[in-house]
Amino acid sequence: MIVGMRKGATPEEINGVVEKAKSLGLGTQLNLGTDKTVVALLGSNTGQLPIDIFALLPGVESVARIMKPYKLASREFKSQDSIVSIDGIEIGGNRIVVMAGPCAVENEEQLAVPSNHAPPPSAFRGWRRPAWSCWRELRSSSTCL
């Protein structure tokens, strides 16, 4: 998280942000510019903190989150390719794999139509009946599953 201090923020106001961060178990990095100061808040739980905790402090001009979504799947976190094998099909390797199907299952008919065209996804939401049991039933009558 980045806390931008207003132009002319006093050392006491900057220190107030630093002390608040420390009280929450966060590290800080001060970036002193010619006109204003930016305080970088460091820690694994900054994405879970409401920005108001810092936005309402004296001298603060802005607060911005800098955590990237899907950080664990990024090349910055793991530079090597991730390869997952499902029923002998490698996903993430050199071959292109096309997957399709509903993102939620609401009834058997909705599930049966894509079952003849694509393998089942790894997770389902929406329908109360366990979707995997329907996939197993349809698997015996489908050429793609």
Image (spheres, grey):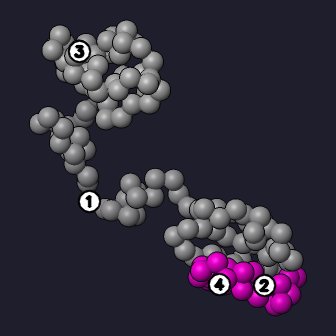
Q: Secondary structure at mark 2?
A: helix
- The answer to the question of whether label 2 and label 3 lie on touching residues, with beta carbons closer than 8 A, is no
Residue type at mark 4?
Lys
Image position of 16 (left or right of 105):
right
> Which residue is more in the foreground, 118 or 4?
118
Mark 2–mark 3 distance (CA, rounded to whole Å): 62 Å
Q: Position of residue 24 (x, y in %)?
A: 64, 78
Q: Earlier in the sequence, mark 2 or mark 4?
A: 2
Location of mark 2 (residue)? 16
Q: Residue furthest front?
A: 129
Location of mark 3 (residue)? 138
Q: Position of residue 135 (x, y in %)?
A: 26, 21
Q: Taking the image as drawn, is residue 116 in sight?
A: yes
Location of mark 4 (residue)? 22
Mark 2–mark 4 distance (CA, rounded to whole Å): 10 Å
Magenta stretch in the rendered image: 8-31
Specify the quadrant of the image occupied by residue 41: bottom right
Vertical side of 20 occupied by 114: above or below:
above
Q: Taking the image as drawn, is residue 31 in sight?
A: no
Q: Secondary structure at mark 4?
A: helix
Image position of 104 (left or right of 6):
left
Location of mark 1 (residue)? 80
